Amino acid sequence: MSAEGSGKQKGEFVGTVKQLEDAKGMLRVEVLSDDKKSTRHLLVLLHDKKIYALDGRCFHAGAPLQMGDIEDFDGHTCIKCPWHSYRIDIKTGDHIQEVYSADRTKRKVRINAKCQRTHRVQLDKNGNIFVTIESLDTRMKSDEYAMISEKSPPKIITLSF
């Protein structure tokens, strides 16, 4: 079992590998952002024995990504938005689109700029999962829906679906 991201610094505790496995590989969590001013809605995923974390609401219209499916799309591991079928690369946060020529005879994959914020994940030797919120210096499309409240008290709530 490994996590995307490594290093010595740990972030916020979001659960254990066992909890993630019991939740069929998806945990919806709320964590306090690094600036300690807001709570953020995240999705922690287990896929191919790796753990990923990204904003838990789709960048496009705020759909709950824990309701989406994981699929391989032309070499990209994506979560598919349950509302509008947008594909988001779980490793990079890129929006992955399938586009066709006007006569629909040629298909290609377009990788749009990163739209979904991804976050650093670390595991300790006991199977505890820690997430560090990515720097919020640059605004991202998913920020609008991931921020739960500017005034939430500091808390971590782990919910499984």
Image: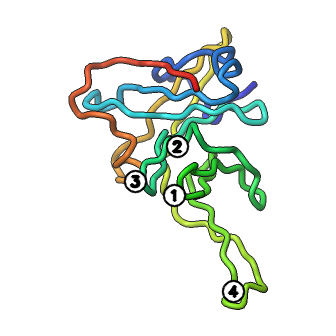
Left or right? Give the position of 74 relative to 34: right
Callout 3–callout 1 Cβ contact below 8 Å = yes
In the image, residue 130 lies at what x, y percent? 54, 22
Residue drawn where x is 62% and y is 15% of the image: 16
Separation (CA) of disc 3 from disc 2: 10 Å
> Around disc 4, counting alpha carbons within 10 Å, would you say few (fewer than 14), some (14 to 19), or many (20 or more)?
few
Q: Which mark is residue 118?
A: 2
Please report contact status of discs 4 and 1: CB closer than 8 Å, yes or no: no
Seen in the image, is 158 located left or right of residue 48? left
Q: Amino acid at mark 4?
A: Ser
> Label 1: few (<14), some or many (≥20) within 10 Å?
some
Q: Nearer the viewer, mark 4 or mark 2?
A: 4
Cβ atoms under marks 4 and 3 closer than 8 Å: no
Q: Secondary structure at mark 1?
A: strand
Rendered location of residue 92, percent (x, y): 59, 50
Q: Position of residue 4 (x, y in %)?
A: 64, 35
Mark 3 is on which residue type?
Met
Q: Which label's residue is closer to the chain start, 4 or 3?
A: 4
Q: Are marks 1 and 2 in contact (CB under 8 Å)?
A: yes
Residue topped by disc 4: 101
Mark nearer the N terminus (3 vs 1): 1
Q: Which residue is mark 3?
A: 140
Q: Quadrant of the N terminus?
A: top right
